[in-house]
Image (spheres, rainbow, N blue to C red):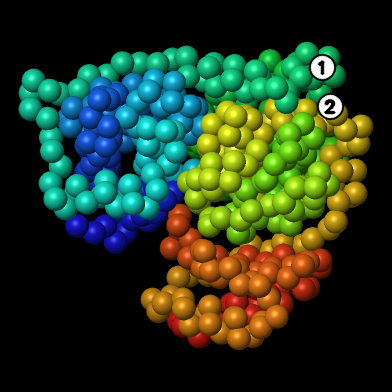
Amino acid sequence: MTDSALMISVSGIRGRVGFGLSPEVVARYASAFGAWALKNDPKKRAVVLGRDSRVSGPLFHQVARAALEAVGADVIDLGLTTTPTLQLAVEHHHAAGGLCITASHNPIEWNALKCVGPAGLFLNAAEGAAMRALIDDGIPYATVDKLGTTHFDGDAIERHLELVLKLPYINVAAIRARGFRVAYDACRGAGGAIIPHLLELLGCEVHEINVETDGRFPRPPEPIPENLGDLEQLVKDTGAQIGFATDPDVDRLAVVSNEGVAIGEDYTLAFAARVVLRHRKGHVVTNLSTSRVLDDAAAEYGQRVIRAPVGEVNVALRIREEKAVIGGEGNGGVILPELHLGRDAPLGVALILQMLLEDPRTVSQVVAASPRYAIIKDKLARPDAPLDTVYAALKAAFPDAEADTQDGLRLGWPDRWVHVRPSGTEPVVRVIAEAPTRAEAQKLIDRGRELLAQLT
C-alpha cells in the first residue's frame, strides 16, 4: 500500500490534516509501529506515547493510543510532551519503542508520527521499511485476551530536566548566581511546558511570549530568523542577554543575540560544542547542510567535524560509531551522547547559558569574533524527474570541488559549499549554500536552481 499524499522518511510519516493524514491513516501506521516494536523485542510490551501541542494532536493521540492497544502494546502515555522527553522516556521505561505525534517545524495544517526504537533513536531506513511492510503483509492485531492497557506517566518532563541539570558541563549554582535575563518564544508549542521551568530552575529572569500550549501558532513555527521578529523586539524591550526560540516539539533551538538579532540556528550547535570541547576532547558529528561555524568552533580546540546525511537518526548513528563527544544538526539540534542520542533544545539552553557563564563576551561579541559566512537556504518544488542529472551537471560545473554523495550532492571548498538534496519532510528539493559573502553564496544557489529548472 502506498500513501502518495504522505511524506515518509527517517523523519517520520507526515501529512496535512484532511489531505492525506486522517484518523484512519494514523491508526494504520500507529498499529504497524506497535506491532513492529513488539515483534522487534518480544520480551517488551510497553510503548511510550506522547504529542506536541498541535490542534490536531489530541484527536490523533486518542487514535494512536487505541491502535497501539489493539496490537497488544501496553501504552505509557506522557500526554503533551516534547520529542526529546519522549526519547528519554523510552530509555527510562526500557520500552519496546515510542511514538510521538508531532510534525516538528511544519505549518499548523500538518501533523505526523515520529517513530522511536528501543534505544531512544528514530528508526533507521531498514527498521522503517520493516515497520511499513506490516501494512502490506497484514497487521497482527491482538485477540481479546491480549489487548494492551494504558498507564500514564506525568513525571517525564521533570526527569528530563533533572538529567540535563546533572550534566558535568552545567554549573547550576554558578548560572543561578548570575541571574541571566532571558527572553523566550515557544510559538505556542510544547516548549511552553518545559523551557520556562528550566530557565526558572537556572535562576533566570524570564520574559516569555507564546508559551500557551494550544498549538495555535501565531507565526510560522520554524525558528528561523525571518520568523523571530517578535522575539528580537522582546530582547530589545527587556534588555535580555539572550533570546531563545524552539520549534513545536522542542528538538530545535534558535538564538537571538543581546542586540536583538536572530543569529541563525547554526550557531546553536557551535556554541554548545564550545562548552563541551572545553572539557572533553573528541570528534564532532553533524550533517552535510550545517554551517562552517561549527568547523571553526571545533578547530579552536583542535578537533575535527565529521559529516553525515541529513536526518537526526543518521547523525546519531554516526555519533555513536565515531564515539563523538557532541554532535547535532545546523537547524538548532544539539545531541550530547552523555544525555541521549537525540536533538534536545533544553540541553541546548543549558549549554549556551554555561557558555555565557564561562565567556565574558556577549553573544554579539562571540559572533563578531568568529569567521563570517553567509548561508542561504532555498527550496524548490520537487521535479518528477530523477535528480541524478542535476548532480552530474553540478559536478561538471565545479570540477575543483570535493564531492560528497552521502545525501544528494554536497560540493565543498575550503571556505564555501553547496548542498542539493530532496527534503524528507516536505515535497521540495533543498538547495543550501554558504560562502564568505551573500553574493557568492547566491551564485551557488542560482546555479543549482538553474539546473533544477531544466527538469521541470
Nearer to me, 302 or 125: 302
- Residue 8: image location, x then y, percent: 36, 54
Q: Which quadrant of the structure image shows residue 354?
A: top right
Q: Report crowding for label 2: few under 14, some 14 to 19, many 20 or more residues within 10 A (C-alpha).
A: some
Nearer to me, 50 or 389: 389
Numbered badge on residue 67: none
Position above or below: 434 against 177: below
Q: Residue at x 31, y 16 (%)?
A: 151
Q: Which quadrant of the structure image shows residue 400?
A: bottom right
Q: Does residue 257 appear left or right of residue 456 in this picture?
A: right
How many discs appear?
Answer: 2
Dot 2 lies on which element? Answer: helix
- Residue 297: image location, x then y, percent: 79, 47
Residue 309 visible to the viewer:
yes
Q: Residue at x 77, y 62 (%)?
A: 374
Q: Residue at x 68, y 76 (%)?
A: 401
Picture quarter with the C terminus = bottom left
State yes or no: discs 1 and 2 in contact (Cβ < 8 Å). Answer: yes
Q: Reading the chain from its start, which is encountered first: label 1 or label 2?
A: 1
Q: Report the amino acid beneath label 1.
A: Ala
Q: Residue at x 53, y 57 (%)?
A: 309
Q: CA distance from mark 1 to mark 2?
A: 8 Å
- Residue 199: image location, x then y, percent: 69, 22
Position above or below: 330 against 44: below
Residue labelled with disc 1: 174
Picture quarter with the N terminus = bottom left
Position above or below: 346 against 377: above
Residue labelled with disc 2: 357
